[in-house]
Image (cartoon, helix red, strand yellow):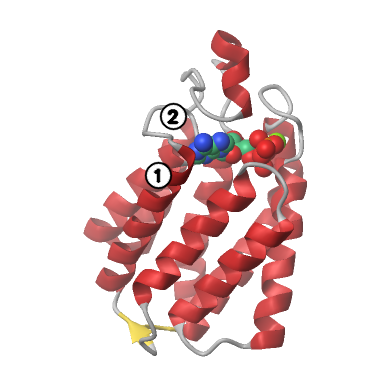
């Protein structure tokens, strides 16, 4: 079973990973964006860990809804509301149970990813974070955290040959082809952090 501490560790491990990879995320956002994705998420996840420490929410759902709210209020750009919605909707789906099963979490995360697709209008293949998140939730249900991490990373890598159909990169049309999507890459960090949180 997964408790509030697990979800706190997930957010802390994501923040550490985003810190380590911030320059790379911003570099990916240079040719097909405005070179702010790393700094956007670094600011957001630092604020998330600070808020979680201060407010110490006691249930999985409360940890994720608070984290999502914090991302929405601190991350400028498209990715803030999208990541915020992902975590808030996932948290809402977990309700106020003190512990949840991996299956319940997989179901809740799917609701979160669906909410991101509704908000942003992106489908798989549009070269966005959805291309890492959808394979991750599929793999999570069948294979657990490690499989989800691998699927998200493969999904992020597979965005390179795609033409962007949503977000800033879509303004480039065919010139967006040949670059890995920054948001799919950060999503793969978020998903990979689940195995880290689980191993501690
Ligand atoms: P901005 O594009 O406003 O500068 P960021 O650089 O922080 O915001 O985030 C860019 C990432 O957001 C993209 O790489 C893409 O993965 C994701 N993104 C942008 N628009 C959408 C959308 N409509 N649906 C899903 N993801 C999106
Ligand atoms: Mg950007």
**Residue at left offset 61%, top offset 45%:** 79
- Residue 65 visible in the current orientation: yes
**Residue at left offset 28%, top offset 72%:** 104
Q: Is mark 1 within 8 Å of ligand 1?
A: no
- Image coords of residue 71 (percent x, y): 64, 60
**Residue at left offset 62%, top offset 88%:** 56
Q: Dot 2: what SS?
A: loop
Instruction: State the separation of the CA atoms marked 2 and 1.
Output: 22 Å
**Residue at left offset 51%, top offset 68%:** 196
User: Quarter-wise, where is residue 78 in the image?
Assistant: top right
Asked if residue 100 lies left or right of residue 88, the reply is left
- Report the number of discs: 2
The answer to whether residue 180 is above or below residue 5 is above
Asked if residue 96 lies left or right of residue 21, the reply is left
The answer to whether residue 74 is above or below residue 157 is below
The residue beneath circle 2 is 158
Asked if residue 177 lies left or right of residue 15, the reply is left
Asked if residue 133 lies left or right of residue 24, the reply is left
- Mark 2–mark 1 CB contact (< 8 Å): no
The answer to whether residue 3 is above or below residue 108 is below
Q: Quadrant of ligand 2?
A: top right
**Which label is found at residue 118?**
1
Residue lying furthest front: 119
- Image coords of residue 162 (percent x, y): 46, 20
Q: Dot 1: what SS?
A: helix
């Amino acid at each position: 079973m997964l408790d509030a501490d697990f979800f706190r560790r997930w957010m802390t491990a994501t923040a550490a990973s985003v810190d380590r990879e911030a320059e790379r995320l911003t570099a990916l956002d240079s040719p097909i964006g405005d070179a702010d994705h790393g700094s956007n998420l670094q600011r957001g996840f630092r604020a998330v860990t600070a808020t979680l420490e201060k407010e110490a929410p006691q249930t999985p759902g409360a940890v994720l809804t608070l984290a999502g709210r914090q991302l929405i209020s601190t991350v400028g750009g498209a990715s803030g509301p999208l990541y915020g919605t992902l975590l808030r909707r996932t948290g809402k789906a977990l309700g106020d149970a003190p512990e949840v099963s991996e299956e319940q979490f997989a179901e809740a995360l799917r609701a979160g990813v669906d909410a991101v697709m509704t908000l942003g209008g992106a489908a798989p293949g549009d070269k966005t974070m959805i291309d890492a998140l959808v394979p991750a939730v599929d793999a999570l249900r069948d294979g657990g955290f490690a499989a989800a991490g691998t699927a998200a990373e493969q999904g992020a890598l597979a965005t390179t040959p795609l033409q962007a159909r949503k977000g800033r990169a879509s303004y480039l049309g065919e010139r967006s082809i040949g670059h890995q999507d920054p948001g799919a890459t950060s999503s793969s960090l978020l998903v990979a952090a689940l195995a880290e949180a689980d191993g501690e």
